[in-house]
Amino acid sequence: MDKKTVLIVDDEKNIRILLKDFLEREGFSVLEAQDGRQALELFNEKCEELNLVLLDVMLPELDGWTVCREIRKLSKVPIVMLTARSEDFDEVHGLEIGADDYVKKPVKPTTLVARINALFRRIEPDESKTVMSYDGLEIDDSSHVVKIDCQEIALSPKEYTLLVLLVENKGKVISREQLLNQVWGYNYYGGLRTVDTHINRLRMKLGSKGEAINTIRGFGYKFEG
């Protein structure tokens, strides 16, 4: 793969050194920031070069939540949140404001790199794999045709995009906010009920296959086909 650049944002120097050394050995280029304000300044300067941001939650100047929200106003660059806190709220909140993944400290570099590579595979799918099949559900992404047991079904563009996002992230919970942002865009001012309405319509059109789209109460949806 092309050499990718990662911005590490953490106020603990030893953690930055550990992750930087390991990521560079794995073939990544690395930039560093020690607080939230420096992170945003560096991001604004180098945004075209960055492929991923590793962002600690507890930072001086500006915390990780604030930095994540500010980056999301400008870019869809993947963001992986890092935290020493164990509260489930942190993970849910991070995903709600636009983070792509969440890793708890102490960070194992090998595990982190595996998560990063998995994230890149999700957002950069193999172009040769244009057909996705799950238990009688077939999605041809080259022609935007969806079939159930070889019978084509008609989906609206938004319904199709929702289905592809859920299937590509099979087994992963996606928040309603993430779906709204990725399908309708960050500048869309409609409410989250828009997502629920389209999911309900999608389930109806998929018939029995729609049962694979599970509601995660209070958060979002997960495809478990």
Image (cartoon, rainbow, N blue to C red):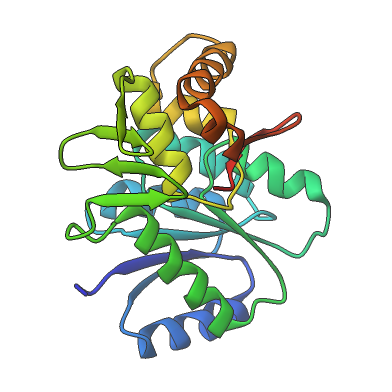
Q: Position of residue 132 (x, y in %)?
A: 33, 50
Task: Tell me: 201 left or right of 15.
Answer: left
Image-quadrant location for residue 6:
bottom left
Judging depth in this view, the residue of 224 and 36 nearest the camera is: 224
Seen at 59% across and 48% down, the residue is: 224
Seen at 23% across and 42% down, the residue is: 141
List the single residue furthest toward the right.
87
Q: Position of residue 40 (x, y in %)?
A: 43, 47
Judging depth in this view, the residue of 133 and 65 nearest the camera is: 133
Q: The N terminus is located in which quarter?
A: bottom left
Asked whether residue 182 is in view, the answer is: no
Q: Position of residue 210 (x, y in %)?
A: 55, 31
Q: Is residue 223 above or below residue 7?
A: above
> How many numbered marks are there?
0
Seen at 51% across and 48% down, the residue is: 37
Image-quadrant location for residue 138:
top left
Q: Is residue 18 above or below residue 199?
A: below
Task: Tell me: 99 left or right of 134.
Answer: right
Judging depth in this view, the residue of 156 and 67 nearest the camera is: 156
Image-quadrant location for residue 222:
top right
Q: Position of residue 54 (x, y in %)?
A: 50, 62
Judging depth in this view, the residue of 53 and 179 nearest the camera is: 179
List the single residue furthest toward the top.
190
Seen at 70% across and 55% down, the residue is: 58
Q: Is residue 139 above or below residue 133?
A: above
Asked whether residue 223 is in view, the answer is: yes
